[in-house]
Amino acid sequence: APHHRLARLHVREREQVVARGDPGTAVEDHRPSGRCHRPVTLKELGRLAKAAVGSGIVLVAQMIDVSLFNDLTVHVIGAAFLVLLAGPALALLGMTAVVVIQALALNDGGITALGANVLNMAVVAVAVASWSIRMVQRRLGARTGLLVAAPVAGIVSVAAAIFAMAAELAFSGVPVGSALSLTMPAHAPFTAWEAATTFVLVFLAAYVRAIKPLASSTST
């Protein structure tokens, strides 16, 4: 009993020292802070899994080159598909991972153009695809909105990425007219391929319920 009383007195003295704030006295507080890390929900794990699988699909799709004319080959971007599948944030991470893997592991795109490719296909394409999907969502809903948003977002995301590439060429010293003539006419037909590919991927993902129909939203 005397030992317990001494222990209580010692604790009380420590609390008084802390309350007075005596200089030069450092007392550690070992009491739990009450904060805890929030566990990851099943919904969040599902989104991560969908983003990983979707990024793999985009990586494979980008390895398929389509010949246009004058020995020009293009491939899909896939940003709109990833946005509809996993949301803008995970789509940004997924597209960045795809571009980095292509440059480092598959020698596609090159290290020197890695920053520009990430900017064009991950940042710009994802941002514009997200914006266009929201615009469609305000006017249409359910399955119709989803199937309309897929090709629309595919087209505008590619157009934005092409315009960003032209701006980068102009910034590097290429005349603006030449930069636009080098990029816009050559890649314009490719938007149809992107729209068709995005539509098919989104349709299949919706069929297996990996993508839910868009919820209608009334514009204010």
Image (cartoon, rainbow, N blue to C red):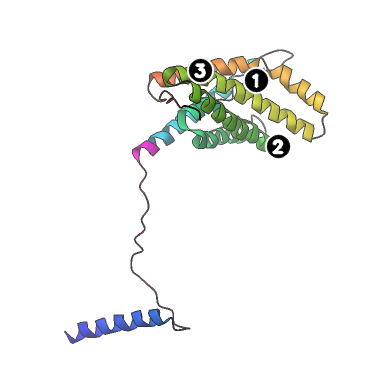
Q: Is residue 118 positioned above or below 135 on the image?
A: below
Q: Is residue 76 magenta?
A: no
Residue 25 percent across, percent down from the top left: 44, 82
Q: Amino acid at mark 2?
A: Thr
Q: Using the image as rendered, state which of residue 116 and residue 143 is in the foreground.
A: 143
- From mark 3 to mark 1, how far is it between C-alphas? 24 Å
Residue 85 appears in view: yes
3 and 1 marks in contact (CB < 8 Å): no
- From mark 2 to mark 3, how far is it between C-alphas? 36 Å
Disc nearest the viewer among 3 and 1: 3
Q: Amino acid at mark 3?
A: Val
Residue 164 percent across, percent down from the top left: 69, 30
Which residue is disc 1 drawn over? Answer: 74
Query: Is 59 on the left-hand or right-hand side of 142?
Result: right
- Label 2, secondary structure: give it: loop
Residues in magenta, as a range: 25-45
Residue 63 appears in view: no
Residue 154 percent across, percent down from the top left: 57, 22
- From mark 2 to mark 1, how far is it between C-alphas? 19 Å
Residue 197 percent across, percent down from the top left: 54, 17
Q: Is residue 42 magenta?
A: yes
The mark that comes first in sequence, 2 or 1, is: 1
Q: Is residue 135 positioned above or below 116 on the image?
A: above
Identity of the residue furthest to the left in this view: 1
Q: Which mark is residue 112?
A: 2
Which residue is disc 3 drawn over? Answer: 148
